[in-house]
């Protein structure tokens, strides 16, 4: 507890409140409008729905008491009357306990039993008892999970049930789980199971105004889901983490209205200096019971947590250990955008609906990775889908460690089959890729993808979860190809209307296309192309090369930069160049470097004083040869390399390695240019994502399913 500025009243939190001001008429008006905006989104349940949930919980509680009674009679040989006194109780936690659950949401429950009831009884006899209930559907047990759980649907309500055995001879009705002495002589699985209820109760105890807290949390949870940043398993924040962030803001502004709390939420956390931890109360200096608590001074792995939000109940843990560099960057950016919107709302320039507009994820990037998990049997699919979802963060970590990838943005929402002919037991996740601004190079993601699939199959086999009908497939797709995997409604979600091009710009674009077309017809043997016009690259591979990975901002004064083309369109929107057969055999031309006296560098030239890659300049521009046939593949035969105009080699480095921009004729035609050495590109990333993936234990080897073809990308800038 902390005291206010006058020292007369204590407030919960590790610091004093920033403001004790109460709501003014505008705050109250905006809070009323906020509630009106939330109602159409299914945020509030009706009285009948709430009553049905209470009925389901009472039925489950009766089953638990009956089960404990039966097991007690069998184990202790006491009479049924005495066995009745052993008790047993079902507690709730999560969004339902916080009072912020939505329509159709599941209920997180905890079954607490006396000391003679064991976990093995819960997953055997109680599981069999649930099987006999006609109201129970989709029953499945996950006993090997980090927090063992039984999942089911009871009379239309989804339930997740944990189990904890207390070191007590009987369970009283007025049991308070916040009492730390209950943790004595418990194993770690029981402590983790109890932690959900203990944390939820502590949060409600540490906020000054529960009703304002609930309204603000409802809004923040809806906002996070709309923006695609609500998922602990994927690497964003889960429900308890969002609740703790809102609770901290309530502590800083204890008398504020919900509308003010939301605006302050974005203000505080858009400026928060991560990885400074978020705490709701001070951590105790002495660890009396000896359980592991979050403490970077003692535990080195805790020092690498990027966005620590510490649970208030002992043993304190970081609820956001799954957060990666990419997910933190995405959330911080959303905080900043949320602050801008709420500021406009307070200036009455926007309405609350603006804050809850869906993310434009499928319009945001040029290239995506699609992860597809499927199984033939429904039971296998349910297990496989949850398992793959829990491993996606490993794939994100692999992609982040790639030297050329700046951001790997995964959407928490999974998508089912697009067409009826497609396998119904399938889930798809999408990852948008953003690259560092480097010159034209080839990036091979095959190793990053393959190492992920190897781990997935090996661990699934080790856990005895893998079955023959389970498959995982990873593909690369361009933005324009997303319609093959998701519906048009999802694809256009959050899309902004495209701006019409100015007529003068359209004329300029037409003139540029005409110039290129005229040049291609006038030069039958050589096609001269200025490096300052655009950068095109052709790989000496027979496979289709993925081009134009990154969009860059060009100077408006650069007449040859192609800035008159739509900025959200692909860079390959330049006109196709049809060459004659003789031109196809010699499509490599020497490029001219701009006058160095102008102080500018060619797009193909690397300024070693400014470029983070320090790559040497290539002395030629490679023009992709587009065949006149209907094939869309970019091809160049081996014969063209030995014909009239041979490829010139760039100057080799002193260590004998070649520049990543150089074409090595000695290699096979399917090879791609080598990536830059780490020393040449280390400056691209100001902060490298730490390796949070622990070494895997020795496990049985299973032949992983290899990608049908390597996933290779070509980074290219205009």
Image (cartoon, helix red, strand yellow):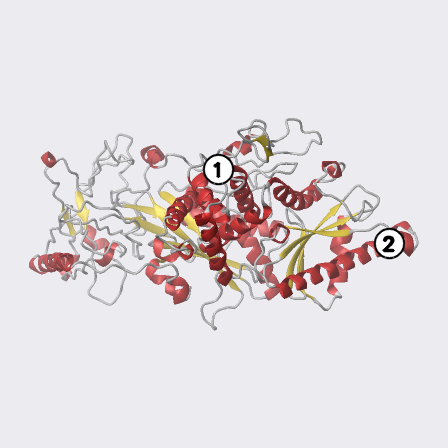
The residue labelled by disc 2 is 84
Which is more N-terminal, label 2 or label 1?
2
Which of the 4 quarters of the picture holds residue 604?
A: top left
Query: At 51% from the left edge and 39% from the top edge, which residue is drawn?
Result: 253
* Residue 229: mark: none
Q: Is residue 323 visible?
A: yes
Residue 225 located left or right of residue 87:
left
Q: In the rendering, at what x and y percent does residue 499 appear?
A: 25, 59
Residue 306 disc label: 1
Front-most of residues 212 and 570: 212
Q: Determine if residue 391 is in view.
A: no
Name which quarter of the figure residue 158 lies in: bottom right
Where residue 147 appears, x then y in whole percent? Answer: 65, 47
Q: How many marks?
A: 2
Quarter containing the N terminus: top right
- Position of residue 665 measured from the top left corner of the image (x, y, whole percent): 25, 46
* CB under 8 Å between discs 1 and 2: no
Q: What element carries label 1?
A: loop
Which is more toward the observer, 7 or 135?
Answer: 7
Q: Where is residue 126 in the image (x, y as percent from the top left)?
A: 76, 57
Nearer to the camera, 560 or 656: 560
Residue at the spot x=66%, y=61% of the render? 53
**For the residue carrying disc 2, how many other residues have a C-alpha within 10 Å: few (<14), some (14-19), or many (20+)?**
some
Classed neighbour count for the residue bearing mark 1: other residues with Cα under 10 Å, few (<14), some (14–19), many (≥20):
many
Q: Depth-wise, is mark 1 or mark 2 nearer the camera?
A: 2
Residue at position x 90%, y 56% in the image: 80
Camera-side residue of 349 and 237:
349
Work out whether 605 lies above or below 494: above
- Above or below, 18 relative to 385: above
Secondary structure of the residue carrying numbered label 2: helix
């Amino acid at each position: 507890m902390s005291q206010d500025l006058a020292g007369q009243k204590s407030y919960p939190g590790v610091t004093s409140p920033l403001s004790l001001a109460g709501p003014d008429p505008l705050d109250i008006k905006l809070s009323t409008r906020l509630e009106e905006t939330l109602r159409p989104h299914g945020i509030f349940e009706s009285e009948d729905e709430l009553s049905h949930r209470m009925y389901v919980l009472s039925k489950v509680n009766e089953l638990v008491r009956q089960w404990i009674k039966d097991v007690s009679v069998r184990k202790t040989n006491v009479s049924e009357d005495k066995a009745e006194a052993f008790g047993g109780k079902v507690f709730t936690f999560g969004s339902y306990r916080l009072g912020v659950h939505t329509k159709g949401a599941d209920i997180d429950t905890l079954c607490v039993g006396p000391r003679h009831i064991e976990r093995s009884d819960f997953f055997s006899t109680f599981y069999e008892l649930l099987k006999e209930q006609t109201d129970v559907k989709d029953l499945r047990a996950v006993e090997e999970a980090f927090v063992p759980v039984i999942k089911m649907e009871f009379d239309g309500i989804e339930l997740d049930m944990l189990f904890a055995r207390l070191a007590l001879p009987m369970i009283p009705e007025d049991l308070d789980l916040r009492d730390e002495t209950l943790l004595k002589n418990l194993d770690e699985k029981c402590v983790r199971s109890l932690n959900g209820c203990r944390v939820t109760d502590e949060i409600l105890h540490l906020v000054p105004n529960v009703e304002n807290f609930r309204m603000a949390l409802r809004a923040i949870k809806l906002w996070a889901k709309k923006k695609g940043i609500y998922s602990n398993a994927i690497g964003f924040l889960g429900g308890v983490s969002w609740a703790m962030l809102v609770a901290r803001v309530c502590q800083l502004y204890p008398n504020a209205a919900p509308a003010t709390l939301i605006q302050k939420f974005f203000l505080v956390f858009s400026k928060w200096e991560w990885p400074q931890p978020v705490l709701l109360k001070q951590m105790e200096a002495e660890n009396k019971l000896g359980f592991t608590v979050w403490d970077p001074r003692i535990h080195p792995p805790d020092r690498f947590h990027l966005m620590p939000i510490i649970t208030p109940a002992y043993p304190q843990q970081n609820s956001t250990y799954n957060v990666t560099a990419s997910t933190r960057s995405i959330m911080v950016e959303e905080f900043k955008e949320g602050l801008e919107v709420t500021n406009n709302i307070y200036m009455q320039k926007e309405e609350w609906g603006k804050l809850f507009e869906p993310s434009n994820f499928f319009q945001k990037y040029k290239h995506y990775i699609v992860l597809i998990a499927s199984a033939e049997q429904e039971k296998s699919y349910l297990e496989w889908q949850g398992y793959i979802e829990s491993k996606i963060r490993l794939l994100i970590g692999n992609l982040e460690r790639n030297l050329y990838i700046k951001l790997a943005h995964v959407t928490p929402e999974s998508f089912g089959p697009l067409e009826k002919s497609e396998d119904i037991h399938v889930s798809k996740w999408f990852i948008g890729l953003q690259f560092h601004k480097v010159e034209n190079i080839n990036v091979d993601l095959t190793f990053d993808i393959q190492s992920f699939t190897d781990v997935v199959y090996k661990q699934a086999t080790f856990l005895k979860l893998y079955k023959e009908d389970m498959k995982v497939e990873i593909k690369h797709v361009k933005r324009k190809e997303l319609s093959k995997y998701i519906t048009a409604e999802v694809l256009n979600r959050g899309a902004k209307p495209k701006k019409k091009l100015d007529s003068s710009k359209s004329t300029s674009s037409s003139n540029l296309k005409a110039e290129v077309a005229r040049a291609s017809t006038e030069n039958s043997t050589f096609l001269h192309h200025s490096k300052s016009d655009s950068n095109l690259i052709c790989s000496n591979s027979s496979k289709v090369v993925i081009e134009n990975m990154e969009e860059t901002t060009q100077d408006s004064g650069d007449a040859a930069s192609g800035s008159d083309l739509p900025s959200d369109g692909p860079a390959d929107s330049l006109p196709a160049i049809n060459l004659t057969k003789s031109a196809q055999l010699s499509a490599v031309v020497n490029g001219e470097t701009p006058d160095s006296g102008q102080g500018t560098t060619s797009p193909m030239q690397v300024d070693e004083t400014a470029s983070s890659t320090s790559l040497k300049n290539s002395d030629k521009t490679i023009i992709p040869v587009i065949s006149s046939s209907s094939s869309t593949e970019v091809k160049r035969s081996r014969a063209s390399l030995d014909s009239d105009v041979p490829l010139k080699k760039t100057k080799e480095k002193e260590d004998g390695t070649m520049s990543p921009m150089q074409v090595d004729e000695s290699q096979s035609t399917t090879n791609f240019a080598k990536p830059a050495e780490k020393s040449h590109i280390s400056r691209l990333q100001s902060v490298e994502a730490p390796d949070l993936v622990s070494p895997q234990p020795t496990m049985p080897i299973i032949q992983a399913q290899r990608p049908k073809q390597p996933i290779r990308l070509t980074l290219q800038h205009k």
